[in-house]
Structure formats: C-alpha cells, structure tokens
Amino acid sequence: MSAISRISSTCLRLTAALGLSAALAIAFTPRTSAAGPVTNIAGKAVTWQLDGGWFTDNGDFFLGAGAQLGVARLGHVVPNVEWVMLDGGNAYTINLDVLRNVLPTKRVTGYLGIGVGMFIVDPDQGDSDSHGALNLIVGAATTASRFNPFAQFKWIATDGDDPQVFAVGVRF
C-alpha cells in the first residue's frame, strides 16, 4: 500500500469516526436532567460559534465554526472545523472537543477542554497530508448577553508539529 493510500485511508476512517461521534452526540444529547434543562456555557441546549485567531508559532490566521452542545455530567461537546490560511496553501482541522466549566460565575465562565481531531495540510505545490491530533484547551466565555464572546488557547499535539492556537469568537 502506498503512502498516499495509507494517508487517504486513515483520513477517511478518522473523518468518518469524527462525523459519527458528532452525530451521536447531537442525537443523544439529553434535553433535560433531574436538575432541569441541560445547557451549555451560554445557558442553551445548543449554541453556534464562530471564531478566528492565529497560530502563534508561525502567525497564520484561521477562521472556524462549530456548535456547542450541553451534555449531562460530561460538560459541553463542541464539534467544529477550522480553515487555516497558510502561505502557499491551506490547512484544515476537524475537531470534536469536550469542554468543562471550572470557574463558573454569574457573567464569566472559565473552562478547560480536551478533544480529538484531524489536521489536514494541503499545499499549493505537492501532495496533501493528514494526521490525527489531540487538543488541550483553556478559555473563558461571557454569559451576559445573546451574543457571548469567548477567548481560548489551544495546544494541538499532532505528528511532527505541535502548534499553539489563540482564538477569539462569539457563541449565539
């Protein structure tokens, strides 16, 4: 089996696993618990998010989108994608993160997270490359309005490169 076939096969399997995980998380997200409705950081069952930021090691910017689902006893499941604007190509991440509130207050919530993902690099010249990734996240979000800004720092442990990402965004 050639290297490209192995990469394509691995990419397909991981993408299918992430998609299935996200679908199961959405399908089996409880709507209520013994303590009342299960909510995410913004106090809703499902919240959408848009974010942007940069990779601190090389200064490349990215745009991202995702959903945040409140899940009882687990925290918040966040399936999301990011598009990284590289010089001479593009990169993409497909992620499934779990966030847990650690410093909840009335207006601001601190959180920690962990997740899995797929990091795909597609240069203008040459073959694309993809590999799995582990995400470690620390952040803070406001809960004061309909549009809730957040900021987070994410460390991505991946094959041969471990970029750090700073992101700001809004959940609504």
Image (cartoon, grey):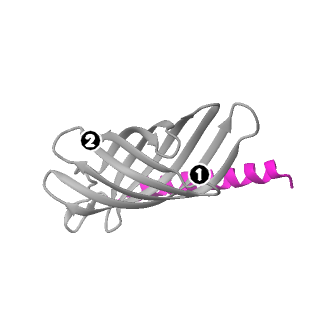
In the image as oriented, which residue stretches furthest toward the right? 1
Q: Secondary structure at mark 1?
A: strand
Residue 45's mark? none
Q: Nearer the viewer, residue 128 or 36?
A: 128
Q: Nearer the viewer, residue 124 or 120?
A: 124
| Residue for badge 1 | 118
| Residue for badge 2 | 149
Reply above or below: 24 against 60. below
The x and y percentages for residue 16 are: 62, 52
Q: Which residues are magenta?
A: 1-30
The x and y percentages for residue 119 are: 59, 49
The x and y percentages for residue 145 are: 17, 40
Q: Residue at x 67, y 38 (%)?
A: 122
Q: Nearer the viewer, residue 158 or 38?
A: 158
Amino acid type assigned to the residue bearing label 2 in the image: Pro
Q: Secondary structure at mark 2?
A: strand
Amino acid type assigned to the residue bearing label 1 in the image: Met
The x and y percentages for residue 48 are: 35, 41
Magenta: main secondary structure equals helix
Q: Quadrant of the C terminus?
A: top left
Q: Quadrant of residue 147?
A: top left
Q: Residues within 10 Å of mark 2 (few under 14, many from 20)?
A: many
Compared across the picture, whether 37 is left or right of 81 comes to left
* Distance CA(mark 2)–CA(mark 1): 26 Å
Reply above or below: 112 against 69. below
Compared across the picture, whether 88 is left or right of 149 comes to right
Q: Quadrant of the N terminus?
A: bottom right
Mark 2 / mark 1, whichever is N-terminal: 1
Compared across the picture, whether 3 is left or right of 43 comes to right
Q: Quadrant of residue 28?
A: bottom left
